[in-house]
Amino acid sequence: MRTDTIRDRIWNLIKQYWEQEQIRTNPPTRLLNNSFEVFTTIRDWKPTLLQSPLSVQIELTNQCCSRCSMCQRWTWENSDRTILTLSEIQDLLCDLAAMGIRTVTFSGGEPLLREDLPDILALANKYQIASGILTGGPRVPDSHLIAIARYAAWVRVSVDGSNRDTYAAVRGVDSFEEVQGFIERLGESITQSAAASRCRLSVSYTIQRGNIDDALNMMELVERWGCDGLTYKFAHGPGRYVCSLHQLAKLKDEMLRQEALVANRTNISFLNRFIEKYSTPSCIADGKPLRAFYSQNELLCVATYLFALVDAWGDVYPCCYLYHDNDDCNTNRSLSGAYRLGNISTCRFSELWRSKEYQAMRRSLSPIDIHDHPECAQCTRHFIQNAFLSDLYDLFLEAQRSDRDFEGSLFSRTLHELSDQSIAWL
């Protein structure tokens, strides 16, 4: 296969799947650097060849301030298990740094409820790991805000209503003013911070039955707050909170088709493409946005080679969907165990990452079968990565068949040349 042909075909795939989340900054070009080694591992099924993941999510606590209609995480608070200590988190970050991992996402529960959060962020910075935070925006001491502004690369605040009543109906708590105050205070701390790079502050809005008519108002509020971005996503899962078909049709008519309302700081244009290209209204209304997509396309779950989740107890999972992170405590315990790959208290993450058990899990997801893994039909986080890299893997196999010296081939060099070496979160 000629060099210009390889480059053109890879570049066409990049353009076809050019999407990125505004805050996590994960376009296709940032997935290329590890892809040749990942493809070689998939081809030969040798986990010892696998490089480190691009990013890891670390849950800091199961405590939560909200009682969201679409998430039962707050039911986990009474578990008798002990969450990771600061010392254990330090050991984990040290291990991740030694592997060459450059980004982590801290989440929960509500990660800002940890009193030692400033110390955790400082440790990540010490090990030269960039950190992002997923939060609901609770009331926190100034020390937390100063540490976030100093050390975090980004913060995404879940605000599922632009006013007190809508917010309370979805989130189950009357905390709208508190969250608004958090955003304003954090914005001030970021402005005053002397950090070398500015922390980006954004809002996440989960569209569902109880707030879909309010979604447009959120755009105006985020502009007024001066945030760097607004990410819309659809609620998923088996609940009465998911949008109705009538609501989805109205959403497209009133918001998604009005180009004048599409701002650079939102992902509205992507949301429109998501409905038309990757999902269907019926799938969204059924709480399984990617059901048709994965049923109609034979795709590898390449995300399991690029990402991992460590929960607040130290258990390691391939992703948050197979972890059942939004389910109630009993459902999580009964369903997530099949995907648990070990605990960092008994085995280092780096060892688990290349273990036979982890590789067997990856193999069971190649290709993705939503009958065996129904959780994947809900996955709105990794599906584009899976689609892009699955198509690129097919090209990898095609190039191999036409290149006798494939291991040192033009294909590998072309991937490296087109790759964006900047850090990325998945």
Image (spheres, rainbow, N blue to C red):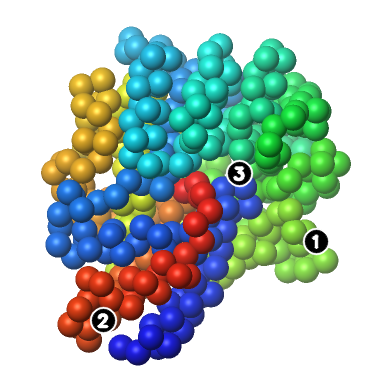
In the displayed orientation, state which residue is furthest to the right: 224
Nearer to me, 133 or 338: 133
Residue at the image position 62 percent from the left and 38 percent from the top: 154
- Please say if 219 is above or below 411: above
Label 3 residue SS: strand
- Please say if 118 is above or below 195: above
Q: CA distance from mark 2 to mark 1?
A: 43 Å
Residue at the image position 40 percent from the left and 21 percent from the top: 89
Q: Amino acid at mark 1?
A: Leu
**Image location (x, y in percent) of residue 23:** 62, 47
Q: Are marks 2 and 1 in contact (CB under 8 Å)?
A: no
Label 2 residue SS: helix
Q: Amino acid at mark 3?
A: Thr
Residue at the image position 53 percent from the left and 75 percent from the top: 15
Instruction: Specify which label sits upstream in the sequence, 2 or 1.
Output: 1
Q: CA distance from mark 3 to mark 1?
A: 18 Å
Task: Decide: few, some or many residues near mark 1? Use Cα within 10 Å; few <14, some 14-19, many ≥20.
Answer: some
User: Could one spot residue 388 in this view of the protein?
Assistant: no
Can you identify the residue that label 1 sits on? 261
Q: Are marks 3 and 2 in contact (CB under 8 Å)?
A: no
Can you identify the residue that label 3 sits on? 206
Q: CA distance from mark 3 to mark 2?
A: 40 Å
Q: Position of 99 compared to 268: left or right?
A: left
- Please say if 19 is above or below 223: below
Quadrant containing the N terminus is bottom left
**Image location (x, y in percent) of residue 90:** 40, 21
Instruction: Specify which label sits upstream in the sequence, 3 or 1.
Output: 3
Residue 115 circle label: none
Image quarter of residue 311: top left
Task: Decide: few, some or many residues near mark 2? Use Cα within 10 Å; few <14, some 14-19, many ≥20.
Answer: few
